[in-house]
Amino acid sequence: MADYQAPLRDMRFVLNEVFEAPALWSSMPKLAENVDADTADAILEEAGKIAGGVLAPLNREADEQGSKWNDGEVTAPEGFKEAYQTIVEGGWNGLGGNPEFGGMGMPKMLVAQFEEMMQGANMSFGLAPMLTAGACLSLNAHGSQELKEKYLPNMYSGVWAGAMDLTEPHAGTDLGIIRTKAEPNGDDSYSVTGTKIFITWGEHDMAENIIHLVLAKLPDAPAGPKGISLFLVPKFLVNDDGSLGERNSFSCGSIEKKMGIKASATCVMNFDGAKGWLVGEANKGLAAMFTMMNYERLGVGIQGIGAAEASLQNARVYALDRIQSRAPTGAQQKDKAADPIIVHPDVRRMLLTMKSYVEGGRAFSTYVAQWLDISKFSDNDEQRQHAEGMVALLTPVAKAFLTDRGLDACILGQQVFGGHGFIREWGQEQLVRDCRITQIYEGTNGIQALDLMGRKVVASKGKLFELFAADVATFIQDNSNDDVLRPYLESLSAALERLDDVTDAVIKQAEVTPNAIGAASVDYLDMFGLTALAYMWAKMVKVAAQKAEGDTSGFYTGKLKTARFYFERLLPKTVSLAEGIRSGSDAMMDLSDDEF
Ligand SMILES: Cc1cc2nc3c(=O)[nH]c(=O)nc-3n(C[C@H](O)[C@H](O)[C@H](O)COP(=O)(O)OP(=O)(O)OC[C@H]3O[C@@H](n4cnc5c(N)ncnc54)[C@H](O)[C@@H]3O)c2cc1C
């Protein structure tokens, strides 16, 4: 297996050349004081060392060992505790956190690159800092000043870890039917009782304390999603002076045996009158969770890119080394018994598909992160509102499209290895197993598609879609005189028009039947993602075309050639997707239950 190397060159290209992030940061005073180009570069460099030098070497062995449960205690695989300490010492947990409580206040555009490296190097481990950062985000946005002061500094530093406890045995997608209860204690605390399942890193030995954010229902709560509240429930109670007190009354009942991310503990958590504190308003817990989810969902999309990048790195090395058969055009390496498999068009198709999705996906996640940063740091109300609309629209696309393509890339990488991809030795089968969960947790990809089509596109009568369409149209208009870009802009323009037509068609279908939304949603999200990546590739062509002449590294010329592959071979998938979507929901709803 190739050693994972953080793709720093490409990250710098995306950040500095495509999105000109340092200029954007310096235009927003709240960010300008925290970050500039040099700081960002130093952070990337250091993060790359940790990902490649500390996290990646643990990945394989930790997968074999798994986390271990013993009488309620969970031990992480060998080396994880020390690696976690490295994260703590560098303050990496608080990279994007609020400086008022010890965070570093870095932009998401930069944090996203760090997350990708960590997830690409070791996804099981990466989940621990990711969930802690998510818990911090909810607490920072919705917690009282007292809760923030008491918990955030130790969570940003990573001395205390975080966990998110939503799912119950009977309630996953539909959190409105959870049964966990929270009874007021008569002071400012509550007693939380219930069982949560599938809680990632709900228990472990890497941090001194674990702060759980738990969804539960108050005694008089309305039924359904409007009756859910969010509680902070620490593993060890925290004394007024900040020292750790007695163990809270909940424990880890067991951990799951599972397909992938085996090194991470997936815990059953039993709360038995555990002491907790309300975060935000009563019955508004789901909204508080959603604050975190826009970040977390992008984070899961980034896990898809991280795994895909690792797969591409492995497959590229293997395809250059493995010799089988001769090139269709005649022997290329006559001194060898056969040519390297990279000469075969089908192997190139696989590698180029991976490269297109990885590099296009990295640009897209940075684009979404850019809107998150504007929505958080801009001083201009109108700009912030516009950015919030973009984030709402694009987040489900980032989560689902990037993880779907992430798994595709892991499977394609496995295919490049032939039978060697199926056995343990080369690491490809682990990537496939690890990446699969990204399509399921944090809201299944089917639910993301419903969110995009139903809550975002149809509910806004197409207004949110128009924000994105206008952004793409402006780019096309502004660059219409660029000769190199012109053919790409023509294809992009056609794809945008196709997506626009289909958007209108589904909005009209939905007026006639509510099933139209669910019938169209997954294909629509795919079409949206493919069009968004075409936009990203056009942006990259614009920069690369200016720098390709005299480029001896192959970086910029490689970009131009990959863009061509994307536009000629992948973007046309939108034509067949549009055809299917337009056919409506009848074919899906026609069968009776007996006929399945
Ligand atoms: C390894 C792992 C780690 C996890 N980590 C965490 C964690 O840290 N914290 C946490 O709280 N949870 C966690 N989860 C839980 C995860 O988020 C849920 O499994 C996921 O949200 C799906 O819920 P479910 O499994 O109950 O499936 P269900 O909700 O039962 O869904 C089953 C199927 O029905 C579909 N479906 C359901 N409702 C609809 C609908 N309205 N319309 C269309 N289709 C629908 C779904 O898309 C899915 O395909 C984790 C799960 C795993 C396996």
Image (cartoon, rainbow, N blue to C red):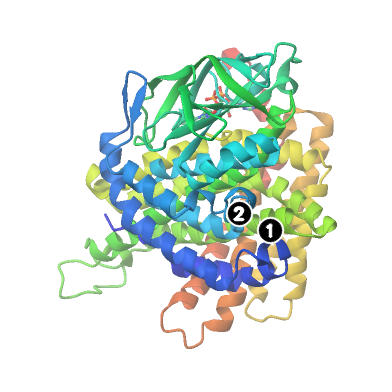
Q: Where is mark 1, residue-wise?
A: 495
Extreme residue toward the bottom, this view: 550
Q: Where is mark 2, residue-wise?
A: 530
Q: Is residue 310 visible?
A: yes
Image position, residue 82 (x, y; %): 32, 46
Amino acid type at image mark 2: Leu
Residue visible at 38% across and 45% down in the picture: 84
Whether residue 579 sits left or right of residue 54 in the image: it is right
Extreme residue toward the front, this view: 241
The C terminus - image quarter: top right
Q: How far apart are marks 2 and 1 (CA)?
A: 9 Å
Residue visible at 57% across and 16% down in the picture: 595
Whether residue 80 sits left or right of residue 16 in the image: it is left
Image position, residue 429 (x, y; %): 32, 43
Q: Does the residue labelled 1 lie within 8 Å of ligand 1?
A: no
The answer to whether the residues at label 2 and label 1 have Cβ atoms under 8 Å apart is yes
Which is nearer the eye, 369 or 533? 369
The N terminus - image quarter: bottom left
Position of residue 90 relative to residue 591, above or below, is below
Position of residue 71 relative to residue 559, above or below, is above
* Ligand 1 lies in quarter: top right
For label 1, the crowd category at 10 Å Cα-Cα, with few meaning under 14, some 14 to 19 and many 20 or more, is many
Give the secondary structure at mark 2: helix
Q: Can residue 522 be seen in this view?
A: no
Give the secondary structure at mark 1: helix
Q: Nearer the viewer, mark 2 or mark 1?
A: 2
The quadrant holding residue 436 is top left
Image position, residue 114 (x, y; %): 49, 56
Whether residue 515 sits left or right of residue 249 in the image: it is right
